[in-house]
Image (cartoon, rainbow, N blue to C red):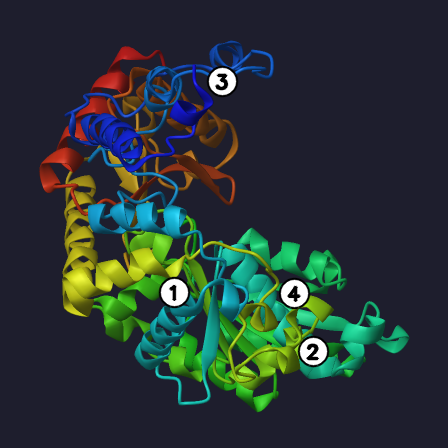
Amino acid sequence: MKRSASLLSTRARAARFGRLVLDATLRQIYGGARKTYSGATTAELDRLFDEPLPENGRDPASVLLECRRKIFRHSMLMSHPRIFGLFNPAPLPIAAFAELPVAFLNQSVDAWKAGPAATHLEIRLIRWMNDLIGFGREAFGVFTSGGGVANTIGLKLARDRIMGARARRNGLSRHLVGRLRVYASEQAHFSIVRSLDLLGLGETSLVRIEVDGSMKMRADHLSDAIKIDKRRGLVPMAVVATAGTTNTGNLDPLRIVGAVARVHKLHFHVDAAYGGALLFSNRFAGRLDGLSLADSVTIDPHKWLFQPFSLGGLFVRDGRRLNRSFTIEPGYLKKDLEAETDRLDFYHYSLEGSREFRGLKFWFSLKALGRRGLGLLVDATMDVTRHLEKRVLGLDCFEPFHAPVECASFCFRYLPAWARRLSPQQRSAGKALARLNRVQIRIQQEVERGGFAWFPTIAIGRAVYFRFGIFNYLTRNEDVDAVLGHIRRTATSLRQ
């Protein structure tokens, strides 16, 4: 195989191969696959990829065939309307196609001179997001790989607010070691505690606040916890509210929690990685009332705004604080050596240095659909979620989790005949609960193996539930009905 052919070094060769890749990809996505997943086990996939490092190259077309056989065939089909998964959306085609110029242009949006137009496009996207949140002209932000990195940056702002510049030079002061406290609900994402580990505060610095029956943080408990910690000589640092919990999709009372943070002069961070998509909704944006009180907000367009991975974002009330927390100037990027010293470099605002041009797919989506068009897709998934809730409530073989539907998530479990004869209290304790949990796990695993649909089981307290997330704008009521029927047939076929 000639080296020049493998490199696709002419336009004609690149175009021929590009058409092959595009055609293969579109056949995979639009081929009407019946299964959500092939069912391959970890052992089977280990064997499939068990091979030595290639010493010599071969025809790219044959590599594509291998990719189709190994990767395409055994990937989760995220565009399938019966996938109700882990915040993996069916990506908008307009957004997916935008990844092609991103890869070929290969702009690194850390320094202006490595991505000038990309820098200015992302600045404008950040402005649009801050306008939707309700932040003023001093607001800024940065696109990240996801909510975990965005949450870490937000909590670093809180740490630096307490300690000032000395935290960057010297780390935690001796008198603050073990004393700083961050407050979040029991349902906060695991990235919050991970961020505290990375920032040197330790996991014990997180104070978990009880949630109410609607899975929302109890603001009265939050206020009490802060007051108690102050009396104990501890140093409250930040309050984290969640707008769209991972398990049930519920939203903390942002305005009330924000008011508590303001009274105690604490940094107020909102993890809206999931629920932030409601900003685009034509009908449900009001559920984010109080978001504008935040000092920093995490939003992941790659969750419920149908963008390909990865695209998260942190948006802050005061961009100057973000700059103070991250600005640094190595010799190869000194501003006084550049033609225009006011060029903005995103590495001054982020944990990351080199990174891809993340914003282009979102820009394409907004330009093609507009805020209203994206909002219609969000609202459509909410309608399907409401349909799911109504169907579950109408069938005595299912039991919904008690939290209200606020985002596109709904949790429920299957009740075998023996469980239906028990009271809710009886089936929520002891051996009955353990047996009922095993039923949910067996049903989910059997459905996954068959490939008819995919949805996760989750633990809420000691109970196991199915969690359906409607993150595919192509999912219809009929798909939900079909999966509920399939669950019932699967349950009947299993010994319980």
Return the disc, 4 or 2, that comes first in the chain's sequence.
Answer: 2
Three-letter residue code for mark 4: Val
Disc 3 to disc 1: CB gap under 8 Å: no
Residue that badge 3 annotates: 57
- Disc 1 to disc 4, C-alpha distance: 18 Å
Percent across and percent down for residue 385 are 21, 49
Q: Which of 230 and 268 is in front in this view?
A: 268
Three-letter residue code for mark 3: Gly
Return the disc, 3 or 1, that comes first in the chain's sequence.
Answer: 3
SS for callout 1 = loop
- Disc 4 to disc 2, C-alpha distance: 19 Å
Percent across and percent down for residue 379 are 17, 59
- Disc 4 to disc 3, C-alpha distance: 55 Å
Residue that badge 1 annotates: 251
* Residue found 59% across the figure and 83% down from its top: 321
Q: Nearer the viewer, residue 263 or 413?
A: 263
The circle on residue 207 is 4
Residue that badge 2 annotates: 160
Q: Nearer the viewer, residue 53 or 311?
A: 53
Q: Quadrant of the N terminus?
A: top left
SS for callout 2 = helix
Q: Which of marks 3 and 2 is in front?
A: 3
Three-letter residue code for mark 2: Asp
Residue 266: quarter of image: bottom right
Return the disc, 1 or 4, that comes first in the chain's sequence.
Answer: 4
Three-letter residue code for mark 1: Leu
Percent across and percent down for residue 338 are 58, 78
- Disc 2 to disc 1, C-alpha distance: 27 Å
Residue 248 shows in the view: no
Return the disc, 2 or 1, that comes first in the chain's sequence.
Answer: 2
Residue 343 shows in the view: yes
